[in-house]
Amino acid sequence: MQPWKTLRRETILNQPPWLVVEHHEVMLPDGRVIPDWPWVITPDYVNVVAETEQGTFLCFRQVKYGLAGTSLAVVGGYIAPGEEPLAAARRELLEETGFHAAAWIPLGCYRVDPNRGMAVGHLYLARGVHRTADPVADDLEEQELLTLTRAELESALDRGEFKVLAWASAVALALRYLSTTERR
Amino acid sequence: MQPWKTLRRETILNQPPWLVVEHHEVMLPDGRVIPDWPWVITPDYVNVVAETEQGTFLCFRQVKYGLAGTSLAVVGGYIAPGEEPLAAARRELLEETGFHAAAWIPLGCYRVDPNRGMAVGHLYLARGVHRTADPVADDLEEQELLTLTRAELESALDRGEFKVLAWASAVALALRYLSTTERR
């Protein structure tokens, strides 16, 4: 299987760091050319499922502009230019909750859109988290920090209370890691 | 917690059905106004984890423009205008594999981006799938249909072989559904 070739790229919308849109002229393996394939660039991000030393989970109840009503959310945010994903995960956990983790388990990094690009999301499970500072509220949205038991987290996932794909993914992959580890 | 208000919306890039970008003038609960909040509209989509009557799983090995190398993928595609998500899931399963499902398990619907909108992904587990027709290849990309055992599917997920967020999510949520159901 041959990859498509990028022949030319042109920026058609430029609002960094939030959104850049390009048109790519691409050539398919059979020689066909698509002159204006939309390519979307948004900032890469991290999401962190934070498990306390007591085996409970830190979550938020949030309003977000893209969601109806409130949603449960996990820790997360954009990766700064030049920042390593794990460093961003540590920073976001500390900023949003004031907590520090004893161990970091990577749950994978995933492209948001196979066709248009968009971001890469880096997902983590942070284990043994404990408070070392006060949180710094720098987000535009209101949010409430919650502590959920494992049973409450599982039930919230199954009821669709994590309304964003990356948040539900991070929770599902973290629970999978925990149950796989416990079975061993 | 109060939602943000949309005061005005302006289309700044119009390439339907693939990509529309708007600027929204939004007002925060504290009265602050953001004049040019980027809002991105891409087509809603379905992804389907297809489990055969024998308990194996239909997957693809694919090249996609937004991914380096090849990726494992699940059945999926865009929802047509006016189409119900489940109808799109049935259609994509039939078109891409020639298979029909005995039962459909919804795994949730999730907004891709909590800030910019983008698509909503509708995820399903199709159980008891069996061939009723030949697949119709209408995608631009080359792809190879594979049958994985449950152990191979689990291992591929854990190794990061599903490189797209929605595909990894659908597999993780389907495996969660199956193991929860089996424990009862």
Image (cartoon, coloured by chain):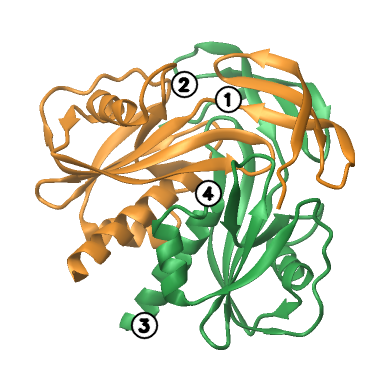
Chain colours: A orange, B green
Location of residue B135 (image quadrant): bottom right
**Mark toward the viewer: 3 or 2:** 3
Crowding at dot 2, Cα within 10 Å, few <14 / some 14-19 / many 20+, comes out as: some
Which of discs 4 and 3 lies nearer the camera? The answer is 4
Q: Is residue A164 visible?
A: no
Give the mark toward the camera: 1 or 3. 3
Identified at 56% across, 44% down, the residue is B111
**Circle 4 is placed at which residue position?**
B163
Q: Which residue is mark 3?
A: B182
Q: Is residue B21 above or below residue A15?
A: below
Tell me where residue B124 sits by quadrant: bottom right
Q: Residue at x 60, y 62 (%)?
A: B74
The three-letter code of the residue at mark 1 reads Lys
Q: Secondary structure at mark 1?
A: strand
The answer to which image quadrant residue A26 occupies is top right
For disc 1, the chain is: B
The answer to whether residue A33 of the structure is visible from this angle is yes
> Label 3 amino acid?
Glu
Amino acid on which the number 2 mark rests in the picture: Pro
Give residue B46's position: percent from left, percent from top: 65, 58
Inter-mark Cα distance, 1 to 3: 45 Å
**Amino acid carrying mark 4 in the image:** Lys
Residue with the mark numbered 1: B5
Q: Are discs 2 and 1 located on one and the same chain?
A: yes
Label 4 vs label 3: CA separation?
27 Å
Secondary structure, mark 3, is helix
Residue A127 left/right relative to B38: left
Q: Earlier in the sequence, mark 4 or mark 1?
A: 1
The disc, 2 or 1, on the residue closer to the chain's N-terminal end is 1
Question: The disc numbered 4 marks a residue on which chain?
Answer: B
Above or below residue B53? Residue B48 is above
In the picture, measured across the screen, residue B14 lies left or right of residue B153, that is: right
